[in-house]
Image (cartoon, rainbow, N blue to C red):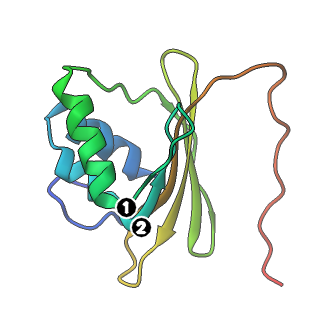
Amino acid sequence: MEEQDNRRSVADPQHLARLLVSRANSGDAEGMAALYEAGAVLARSNQQNLVGREAIRKFYAELISTGIKFHLGEQRQAIICGDIALTSTRLPNGHITAEVARRQSDGSWLWAIDQPAIALTGEKAAGTEDCKDH
């Protein structure tokens, strides 16, 4: 069953990006920030990271006020290793996003780290190894 966008907990890290875009396009900066852990880090292109849900909410509120529309792009399948997941999307402009989500104590997923856009240069990165418990 597909996750509904009604602020319920997110049961699959794959749904975080879709919810972010949906909430952005409906002007819901508070809902966007709710997809992040309380102490999450959002990287900015000017090398100044935003730390904490309130800073992230404020950033998204300002961005939404410009009238910008978000587009989901091409999501990669989330890579899950225990309670950590890597999510990633190729945006329509060719940039790539990379996010680290963490499973919360209630089993839901929230982003802990968000790198919204990485411009690709040179060759594509090689594949990664599977996570193994030691």
Q: Position of residue 125 (x, y in %)?
A: 81, 34
Q: Which mark is residue 64?
A: none
Question: In the picture shown, does residue 130 fall above or below 62?
Answer: below
Q: Which residue is mark 2?
A: 39
Q: CA distance from mark 2 to mark 1?
A: 4 Å
What kind of residue is marked 2?
Gly
Q: Report the residue at 19% width, 20% height from top.
A: 67
Front residue of 57/79: it is 57
Q: Nearer the viewer, residue 16 or 24?
A: 24
Name the residue at 30% across, 41% down.
59
The image quadrant of residue 37 is bottom left
Identify which residue is drawn at 33% across, 63% down. 10
Secondary structure of the residue carrying tag 2 is strand
Residue where numbered disc 1 is placed: 52
Asked if disc 2 and disc 1 are in contact, CB closer than 8 Å, the reply is yes
Image location (x, y in percent) of residue 76: 57, 40
Quadrant housing residue 132: bottom right
**Which SS class for mark 1?**
loop
Across and down, in percent, residue 66 comes to 21, 21
Q: How many numbered discs?
A: 2
Looking at the picture, does residue 39 appear above or below residue 73?
Answer: below
How many residues crowd around disc 2 within 10 Å: few (fewer than 14), some, or many (20 or more)?
some
